[in-house]
Image (spheres, rainbow, N blue to C red):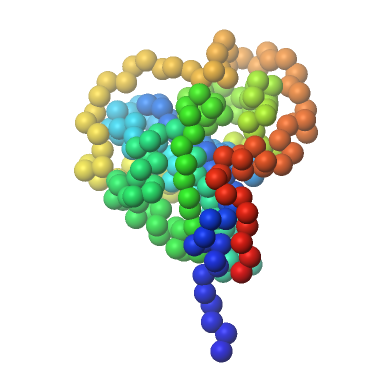
Amino acid sequence: MVQDGRSINHITFTCPQVFCVSDASEFGIGGFNSEGFAWRWEIPPTQRGFFSLNMLEFLASYLTIRMTLKQMVTTDIKHQGIKIQALTDSSCALSWILKGGADEVTRALATDLMEFNSSLCANHIPGKNNIIADSLSRDFHIPKGTLIKEMYRKHGDLMPRNFKIFNLEQADISWICSITPSQRAKQVSVTRRSRSKIAHGLNGQAFLKPPTSEDAFWRTKTDLKSRHPCCVRVRD
């Protein structure tokens, strides 16, 4: 009798197949993965200040993981799943990923990992190195195409190839807005908007210098994989 089991790669120290990087600000959240899939969502004015920054960091990490699972786990490989490495510059969000916290988000994360038969490990990334995700969570005044060109021009070594920015799905937006008050922070006034290092000096106009070709940057995932303590894959 043939029985389905769980791959040993999900219960041992093995190299992840994809990396997810996320960040948050008081005005938005965003993230990307090592396959070049990126997203961002600007928090509507009516919702600003309801969520603590730690909560937004956790939401950004979860949604990046969720989009990666939906993008990569096709029917053909769903029985094997994938192993994800999540990187965040929030120590609180990292703790919630590893130990649980913000119950509704934790339950959603666990449900998605079980549904897609996948596993997750997480590590901290210094905020000064989290430049791309930081820009995704802040620079909504810059059109997507212009922002991508500026990212490649200034920090192409931190980016995967075929980088594209997508909008957050409406179903995910509705879910965020439905989170119960117990998971919300006391509403505070959010008035000052800061920009990322990438957007410094830009006002949204498309007057940038021609970017260096994307092919010159990050042909493999070597740079991100070097962040993981163990990249020796164990075969079943």
Residue 89 seen in the figure:
yes
Pick the quarter of the image with the N terminus. bottom right
Is 204 positioned to the left or the right of 219 in the image? left
Residue lying at 67% horizontally and 41% vertically, measured from the top left: 222
Residue 157 position, x and y percent, is 67, 29
Q: Nearer the viewer, residue 234 or 121?
A: 234
Residue at the extreme top: 201
Residue 132 position, x and y percent, is 56, 29
Residue 47 position, x and y percent, is 32, 32
Residue lying at 48% horizontally and 29% vertically, measured from the top left: 126
Quadrant position of residue 228: top right
Q: Nearer the viewer, residue 194 or 127?
A: 127
Residue lying at 38% horizontally and 30% vertically, measured from the top left: 44
Pick the quarter of the image with the C terminus. bottom right
Quadrant position of residue 114: bottom left
Residue 168 seen in the figure:
no
